[in-house]
Image (cartoon, grey):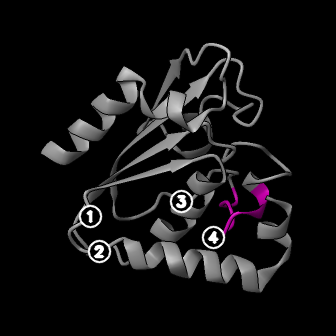
Amino acid sequence: MRRYFTEPKLREAVRARAAELITPDTRVVVGHSLGSVVAYEVLCALRPERPPLTLVTLGSPLGLAGLVFDRLQPAPQQDSTGVWPAPVKQWTNLADSGDVVALVRELAPRFGPEVLDLLVDNGSEMHSMRAYLTAVETGTAIAMGLTR
């Protein structure tokens, strides 16, 4: 994460690669951990007239003031709220209560009440991508995005 925020060329390359994967046919974008930050920034840079999509964030550090939130591109607005990614019509954020990366479990206070924040129980694998991806809540959020 440090390198992503302190090395502009690396950040640009990561975002460019992720942007290549999001086509007009993409209906759901899933981001885990730092991947949720990359997904958020890429989606914020997309044109608002592209087809709407669903964002699902898993174990996301997006709400961490100082470390992540204040370093996002685009920068948070004057009222300390994050910019809503224009193509996103539905955003579900999942966090395990013991996930140390997702210390700010609820993103709605930072990004708006449209974010659906859900707690999941990943057992002893609090930040495991596998545990997040196999959670019923994750499957439901993805399925809802695919049926819109």
Tag 3 residue? 40
Secondary structure found at label 1: loop
Q: Nearer the viewer, mark 3 or mark 4?
A: 3
Secondary structure found at label 3: helix
Report the front residue among 68 and 131.
Answer: 131
Tag 1 residue? 26
Position of residue 63 relative to residue 128, above or below, is: below
Tag 4 residue? 74
Image location (x, y in percent) of residue 34: 66, 53
* Magenta run includes residue 72: yes
- Cβ–Cβ under 8 Å for marks 3 and 2: no
- Cβ–Cβ under 8 Å for marks 3 and 4: no
| Label drawn at residue 145 | none
Residue appearing at x 66%, y 31% in the figure: 127
Image location (x, y in percent) of residue 19: 45, 76
Q: Give how far apart the Cα atoms at labels 3 and 2 are.
A: 15 Å
Which amino acid, by three-letter code, is at mark 1? Thr
Residue appearing at x 56%, y 38% in the figure: 129
Query: Which mark is first along the chain, 2 or 3?
Result: 2
Report the front residue among 74 and 77.
Answer: 74
Q: Give how far apart the Cα atoms at labels 1 and 4 are.
A: 22 Å
- Cβ–Cβ under 8 Å for marks 1 and 2: yes
Tag 2 residue? 23
